[in-house]
Image (spheres, grey):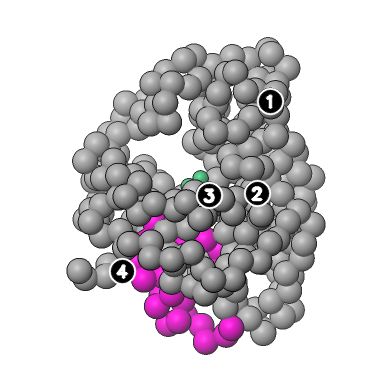
Amino acid sequence: MATKQCMIVNIANDTYAINEYGLSAMFLLIGRDKAMLIDTGCGICDIKGIVGRLTDKPLMTVLTHAHGDHVGGAFRFDEIYLHKADEGMLRNTDSEGMKRYVEGFVDNPFDYGTGEKYPDVYSVRGTDVAEFTKVPETLHYIEDGDVIDLGDRPVEVIGTPGHTPGSISFLDRKTRVLFSGDACNVNLLLPWGNVSDALRGLYKLRDHKDEFDRNYNGHIGYAMMLSCAPMPERVLTDCIYICEGLVAGTLEGSMSETPYGRSAIITFGSVRITYDPDNVQGK
Ligand SMILES: [Zn+2]
Ligand SMILES: [Zn+2]
């Protein structure tokens, strides 16, 4: 099977966005002493090979969370850094699930919220997903408040649970870029967690708003968005507005069939949130 090449964009000094065919996004930050890879994609591209061509610095690989579309290439690494709460999910990574995820985009490329068809621009198939042959031998745990110094380039870890229990974001102080994984985006998925936790994480991002100029999520090239552009500033404020309304009971979504089972969906401004109406406050 040929290994496909994905889109690599230099988004800041010594910083690259790696867009895996609109399915997932990874980021490479290169410091004076070492480099950091944020997420590993679905497992279609040879992410380790790509990183090796961009830097020869020692590499640490970190995960924003352990959903399959972010850990699919983790088997290529011996060591990985993640929040402990997502360890079980990483250990249960299933290549078959990832193949179905990719096929879903390829065979039925439409937005389940709006019914709008996605442009069919990428020639990848589920069969391009590499087998997840092993969990990295060494797992290191990171959590809210940790600062990882890449050498004259401190990167702060911000705990943003909700999408998954162990979701974290990374604030690169040098370039003033935030990498928020799936914790804050235009298609915020919370059917597996609760809105209340997510809101606390979003408040933390807002607390740091004077420290970043750009916010990239884990799906920069997602679906309709074909560029490697950061998200509009209002995505964070819209996410907060909706979550506050859901927690306070002043807003309510409508029930719908989604790829994640029957869930509630609510849309405001730039953002759509899918959530479990029986688990808004947390159990
Ligand atoms: Zn996710
Ligand atoms: Zn994702």
Helix, strand or loop at label 1? It is loop
Residue type for callout 2? Ala
Q: Residue 206: which quarter of the image?
A: top right
Q: Position of residue 33 (x, y in %)?
A: 67, 84
Q: Earlier in the sequence, mark 3 or mark 1?
A: 3
The residue drawn where x is 51% and y is 68% is: 136
Helix, strand or loop at label 3? It is helix
- What residue sits right under mark 3 in the picture? 89
Helix, strand or loop at label 2? It is helix
How far, Cα to Cα, is label 3 from label 2? 8 Å
How far, Cα to Cα, is label 3 from label 1? 20 Å
Of badges 4 and 2, the one in the foreground is 2
Determine which of the numbered discs, if any, sits on residue 85 in the image: 2
Q: Nearer the viewer, residue 186 or 156?
A: 156
- Residue 155 to residue 113: above or below: below
Q: Earlier in the sequence, mark 1 or mark 2?
A: 2
Give the extent of the magenta segment: 37-58
Q: Nearer the viewer, residue 216 or 26?
A: 26
State whether residue 209 appears in this view. no
- Residue 142 to residue 151: above or below: above
